[in-house]
Amino acid sequence: MNYLTLNLIFVAVSLAALFLVPKNRWPAYLVGLLPMVIITAAFDNAIVASGIVAYDSSKLSGFMVGAVPIEDFAYTIAAVAIVPSVWSAMINRKKK
């Protein structure tokens, strides 16, 4: 299994969590996603370029942002989708 396939599974599950959130909150996710992607690009490039993290090139799609494979951004997208969704669901559960 390559990294892209594995990441697509996690992103699909986390995006499904968005259905727990009212639709009027979705723009907030986009506002939160932009800085997170920028921070991920900056720090992951530093980590990969310094040699702390390496990837098996045979399992990469080949699309890179600097030294970072595009697959690395899936974790950020998944976190931005699932963490606030679960948080919101837990707050709504407490209110009932």
Image (cartoon, grey):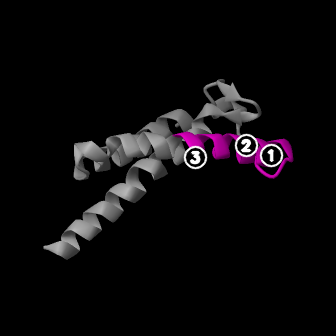
Is the C-beta separation of discs 3 and 1 under 8 Å? no
SS assignment at label 1: helix
Q: Position of residue 19 (x, y in %)?
A: 24, 46
**Residue at (30% x, 61% y) in the render:** 88
Mark 2 lies on residue: 42
Mark 3 lies on residue: 36
**Residue at (40% x, 48% y) in the render:** 81
| Mark linked to residue 46 | 1
Q: Judge the density around disc 2: few (<14), some (14-19), many (≥20) Cα neighbours within 10 Å.
A: some
Amino acid on which disc 2 is placed: Ala
**Residue at (53% x, 34% y) in the render:** 4
Question: In the shown orientation, is residue 55 left or right of residue 72?
Answer: right
Residue in front for this viewpoint, 9 or 84: 84
Magenta span contains residue 52: yes
Given the current orientation, which residue lies at the most extreme top position? 62
Question: In the shown orientation, is residue 64 left or right of residue 12?
Answer: right
Is the C-beta separation of discs 2 and 1 under 8 Å? yes
Q: Position of residue 20 (x, y in %)?
A: 24, 52
Dot placed on the residue nearer the N-terminal end, 3 or 1? 3
Nearest-to-viewer mark from 3 and 1: 3
SS assignment at label 2: helix
Q: Mark 3 and mark 2: span between their CA atoms?
A: 10 Å
Q: Mark 3 and mark 1: span between their CA atoms?
A: 15 Å
Amino acid on which disc 3 is placed: Met
Q: What are the residue bounds of the magenta stretch?
A: 34-54
**Residue at (28% x, 68% y) in the render:** 90
> Can residue 92 be seen in the rendering of this structure?
yes
